[in-house]
Image (spheres, rainbow, N blue to C red):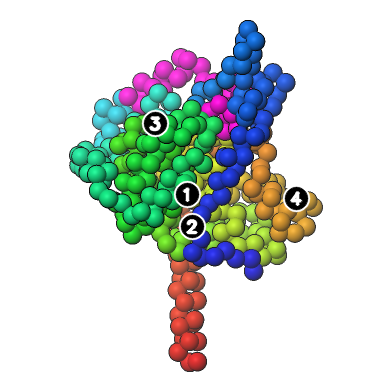
Amino acid sequence: MAVADPSYNQVDTSSDEEDGAKNNINGSPSSPKSVGGYNASKQNGTAVTHIDRYGFMGGSQYTNPDDEHRIAIDKLRQRELKWLEMFDDWEKWMSKRFKKIRDRCRKGIPPSLRSRAWQYLCGSKFLMEHNEGRFDEYLQQPGNPKWEDDITKDLHRQFPQHEMFNSKGSYGQEDLYKILKAYTIHNPRDGYCQAMAPIAAVLLMHMPAEQAFWCFVSICEKYVQGYYSPGLEAIQVDGDVLFGLLKKTQPSVYKHIKKQQIAPILYMTEWFMCLFTRTLPWSTVLRVWDMFFCEGIKVIFRVALVLFKIVFGDAGNFKDCPTLYETLEKLRHIPIQHLDEELVVQDTLRLNINERDMEKEHQKQIHRRKTKDKSKKGGKQKS
């Protein structure tokens, strides 16, 4: 079976750097031309860089204004008022009307309130209020030189075509360093893992450094606990869980991947550890995160299952995937036109799988691993 080194704690981030040499992925005739990797047009003979509504100037994350969904202003204002009403009595809504919050997250959180909503949903607002001054204290403490060096080396790899991170020493890179360094002090057992950086960077696109830090802490300790720990056992377990769920939802795809002996960690590691920030169009990333903050890791499983469906279809189309290589290439390079935010969100909600199925599969995989470990120990003792 194709396997990955269990000590692996690196996630490929070369795609972000390579984007600098590519044209706008949307590439429609009406799109601005790519100049040095940035989307630009000429005004009075001078090249003018175009920045999309999310802050991207080019690369695969750039959103062509002509292609994006726009909600009518009156509908957007109605949604904003509903969210503001919920914020005013948040605990009551969470305890008595959670399904309504969930439904509103699935529709998409209004951009103007996304930062606040994420912090309320994950509990980081409470964390920050009860740890006043702690972030600054972490920054004053000496860190592990190895982790600090690794963080510094990775800064330029995080969304280099975003206005916050596009130059060395930018305020975005400085704040990103602070968050990641502070986390190594907060959690010295896990320290730093490369996949943490894009998560922290996305949070910084929406909120100040201290708020982003506590939101990041909440994600690591509440949503993806153990994902960044040495050995990556948690991510390997969830890879097996995903494979088990694939057998239930798309048996033909399951058989194809099993036949080619492709270990789950080879195709799902970046999806799960980076929470799809390096896989989906940006508007889709944000919609997925809106649901993720509300419903947890099951959203990531659902999106992963939808990606299999998008790549191979319901019936399973494998004629272009005779070997492991072609299968992985298709899973790693999904055409952007198939990843529309509404399409992905609605497909996740249509999946014939529920939370009970996920929990049952998780317990099954945990039991399988324990049994396997016992048999290994028994074999060693006999020898």
Q: CA distance from mark 1 to mark 2?
A: 8 Å
Q: Which span of residues is magenta-colored?
A: 56-84
Q: CA distance from mark 3 to mark 2?
A: 27 Å
Q: Position of residue 224 (x, y in %)?
A: 41, 52
User: Mark 4 — residue?
Assistant: 317
Quarter of the rendering containing residue 5: bottom right
The kind of residue on which mark 3 rests is: Tyr
User: Mark 1 — residue?
Assistant: 195
The kind of residue on which mark 4 rests is: Asn
Classify 12 as above or below 170.
below
Q: CA distance from mark 4 to mark 3?
A: 46 Å
In the shown orientation, is residue 72 left or right of residue 315? left
In the shown orientation, is residue 382 left or right of residue 68? left
User: Mark 3 — residue?
Assistant: 171
Q: Position of residue 56 (x, y in %)?
A: 53, 28
N-terminal of the pair, mark 1 or mark 2, is 2
